[in-house]
Image: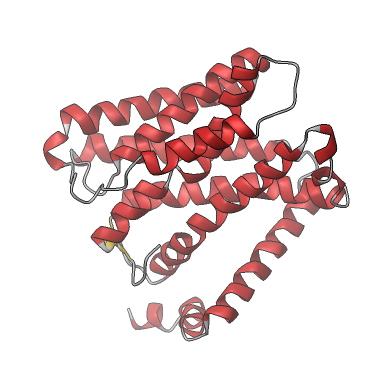
């Protein structure tokens, strides 16, 4: 136990914990930039990022399914996050079939079915273990703004307007879908292992999506975001949404990695995520 506490990684985390917020932010940004560079150098086909992200999301759902079937409890899980996830996945699958059915459509369909099963378990089979009082984030805080943004800013394509607006809603809703889960964990002040694994998987998923767009911008010298005159302010909004998703989960991912390195089974949150 003593060796675990005095390990180099724990010393690094201890040093980081003592730094100011500015230093922590600088180190986080530096680590992310180094990761982006590594991905750009070693992954030649950057569209694979999205496939990897979808697979990781599916694995996160599998972790939840394992928790629900083996432990027979849904404590620590946000029903609202699962419902919001099902909504944007259903919209995405529909739009994928309309635009162009491919491997992404198949992966999203499997993830949607798994998410619906999780919702069923929380609502009916394991309802007695669901802590509704902690899951108190109002969904209209994210659904209404996402719908308004989708009506104002959406893809500039030849498809019907309603389909373009639905695709935009899917992107905006996904970017904030984890907020109810983070609020629940903040209220509980502690996250049990399987829920922590699931949220960390979401963090990795969002990082890969964000990496794709950042690398795309770098490769085009920033011009990819300057096509606003041709109706491509939508591209800028996708980029902003990916950045928002990544930073929403960054703080939790820090506590998750810290807890794992310290050999803890529970992730303790000493500050709001």
Number of marks in the rendered image: 0
Choose top left, top right, bottom left or bottom right for residue 185: bottom left
Q: Position of residue 61 (x, y in %)?
A: 40, 36
* Rendered view: 31 above or below 117: below
Name the residue located 21 percent from the left edge and 46 percent from the top edge: 75
Residue at x-position 44% and y-position 25%: 112
Quarter of image, res 235: top right
Q: Residue at x 43, y 61 (%)?
A: 252
Residue 144 position by quadrant = top left
Q: Is residue 208 visible?
A: no
Identify which residue is drawn at 28% across, 41% down. Answer: 67
* Relative image position of residue 104 (x, y in whole percent): 61, 25
Identify the image's colour scheme: rainbow, by chain, secondary structure or one colour: secondary structure
Of 120 and 175, nearer the camera is 175
Q: What is the residue that sits farthest to the left in this orientation?
A: 128
Q: Position of residue 257 (x, y in %)?
A: 46, 64
Q: Which quadrant of the rendered structure holds the N terminus?
A: bottom left
- Image vertical order of residue 144 relative to residue 223, above or below: above
Q: Nearer the viewer, residue 79 or 198?
A: 79
Whether residue 230 is visible, yes or no, is yes
What x and y, as percent, mark residue 183?
A: 33, 54
Query: Image quadrant for the C terminus?
Result: bottom left
Residue 47 shown left or right of residue 25 in the figure: right
Q: Nearer the viewer, residue 131 or 16?
A: 131
């Amino acid at each position: 136990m003593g060796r675990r506490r005095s390990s180099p990684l724990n010393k690094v985390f201890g040093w980081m914990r003592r730094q100011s917020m500015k230093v922590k932010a600088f180190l986080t940004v530096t680590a992310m930039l180094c990761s982006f560079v590594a991905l750009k150098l070693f992954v030649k086909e950057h569209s694979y990022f999205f496939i990897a992200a979808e697979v990781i999301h599916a694995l996160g759902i599998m972790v939840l399914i394992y928790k629900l079937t083996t432990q027979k409890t849904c404590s620590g899980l946000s029903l609202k996050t699962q419902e919001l996830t099902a909504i944007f996945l259903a919209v995405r699958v529909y739009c994928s079939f309309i635009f162009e059915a491919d491997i992404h459509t198949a992966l999203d369909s499997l993830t949607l079915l798994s998410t619906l099963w999780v919702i069923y378990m929380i609502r009916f089979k394991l309802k007695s273990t669901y802590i509704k009082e902690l899951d108190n984030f109002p969904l209209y805080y994210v659904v209404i703004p996402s719908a308004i943004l989708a009506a104002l800013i959406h893809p500039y394509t030849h498809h019907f307007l309603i389909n373009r607006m639905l695709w935009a809603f899917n992107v905006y809703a996904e970017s904030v879908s984890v907020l109810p889960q983070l609020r629940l964990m903040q209220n509980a002040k502690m996250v049990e292992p399987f829920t922590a694994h699931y949220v960390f998987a979401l963090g990795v998923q969002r990082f890969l999506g964000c990496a794709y767009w950042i690398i795309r911008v770098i490769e085009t010298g920033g011009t990819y975001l300057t096509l606003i005159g041709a109706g491509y302010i939508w591209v800028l909004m996708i980029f902003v949404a990916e950045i928002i998703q990544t930073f929403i989960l960054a703080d939790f991912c820090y506590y998750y990695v810290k807890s794992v390195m310290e050999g803890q089974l529970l992730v303790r949150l000493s500050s709001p995520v």
